[in-house]
Image: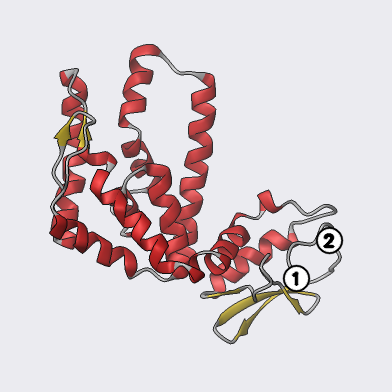
């Protein structure tokens, strides 16, 4: 099957091993990506998760209801052909990581950021030999190039599917370190999301919640949790 079908045409959805991994089959025909590459994924668990998405389609096919399939497509059609470029782009987050840019006031927020974020920077230093330094304010301050090089090497170690997930973990949270913390199961994924939102949560505590902002945060949390799930599926 080539690309995305508009309507369901198949009766049976199955998973089977293929060269290089596992594939999803619709009435015996292998699913392909939008770029017409074979949709071959590294683990049976990921293929089964995609099969569940395809089997759930009725009538008109809704790609938005198939997040695992969409992420697998991105890994094959996009990340695989520019792995080094994607890894370099993500590694650059280390130079301006969310966890390093701290409030200058009030003291309560400064203290909260230090209590919540300093342990993550300590963990990165111990785990990757990469000590990033926090700075006050929003003005850019260069980090130790040796530390950044160490983090970049770790990013480049991810395979195409892991990197597709890592792309969203980092991009949504704004932090390379939080992305690594998710892949290492340092904390529950919801707790890591909360750590990425210390400033927003502080504002909500002072001024109350904005309905639109709350809805936007919920969408981002869902995407963040999906990225984590996709990473785990790539290693299952």
Identify the secondary structure beneath mark 1. Answer: loop
Is residue 160 visible in the rendered image? The answer is yes
Residue beneath disc 1:
2
Residue 170 lies, with reference to residue 34, above or below; the image says above
Residue 177 lies, with reference to residue 16, above or below; the image says above
Q: Image quadrant of residue 1?
A: bottom right
Snapshot colouring: secondary structure
Q: Are marks 2 and 1 in contact (CB under 8 Å)?
A: no
Residue beneath disc 2:
8
Q: Residue at x 18, y 62 (%)?
A: 128
Q: Is residue 102 left or right of residue 156?
A: left
Residue 90 vs residue 14, the one in the foreground: 90
Q: Residue at x 81, y 75 (%)?
A: 27
Q: Position of residue 193 (x, y in %)?
A: 38, 41
Q: Position of residue 121 (x, y in %)?
A: 18, 47
Identify the secondary structure beneath mark 2. Answer: loop
Furthest-top residue in this view = 207
Is residue 185 visible in the rendered image? The answer is no
- Can you tell which mark lies on residue 221? none
Residue 195 lies, with reference to residue 94, above or below; the image says above
Q: Residues within 10 Å of mark 1 (few under 14, many from 20)?
A: some
Residue 137 lies, with reference to residue 40, above or below; the image says above
């Amino acid at each position: 099957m080539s690309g995305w079908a508009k309507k369901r045409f198949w009766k049976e959805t199955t998973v089977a091993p293929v060269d290089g991994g596992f594939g999803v089959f619709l009435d015996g025909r292998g699913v392909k990506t939008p770029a017409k590459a074979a949709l071959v994924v590294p683990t049976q668990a990921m293929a089964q998760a995609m099969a569940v998405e395809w089997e759930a389609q009725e009538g008109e096919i809704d790609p938005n209801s198939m997040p695992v399939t969409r992420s697998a497509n991105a890994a094959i059609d996009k990340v695989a052909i520019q792995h080094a470029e994607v890894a370099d782009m993500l590694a650059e987050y280390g130079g301006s990581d969310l966890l390093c840019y701290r409030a200058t006031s009030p003291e309560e927020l400064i203290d909260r950021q230090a209590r919540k974020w300093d342990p993550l920077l300590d963990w990165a230093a111990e785990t990757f030999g990469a000590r990033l330094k926090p700075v006050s304010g929003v003005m850019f301050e260069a980090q130790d190039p040796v530390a950044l090089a160490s983090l970049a090497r770790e990013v480049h170690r991810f395979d195409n599917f892991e990197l597709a997930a890592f792309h969203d973990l980092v991009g949504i949270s704004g932090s390379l370190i939080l992305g690594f913390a998710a892949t290492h199961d340092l904390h529950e994924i919801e707790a890591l999301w909360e750590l990425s939102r210390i400033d927003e949560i502080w504002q909500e505590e002072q001024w109350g919640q904005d309905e639109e902002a709350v809805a936007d945060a919920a969408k981002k949390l869902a995407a963040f949790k999906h990225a984590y799930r996709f990473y785990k599926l790539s290693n299952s």
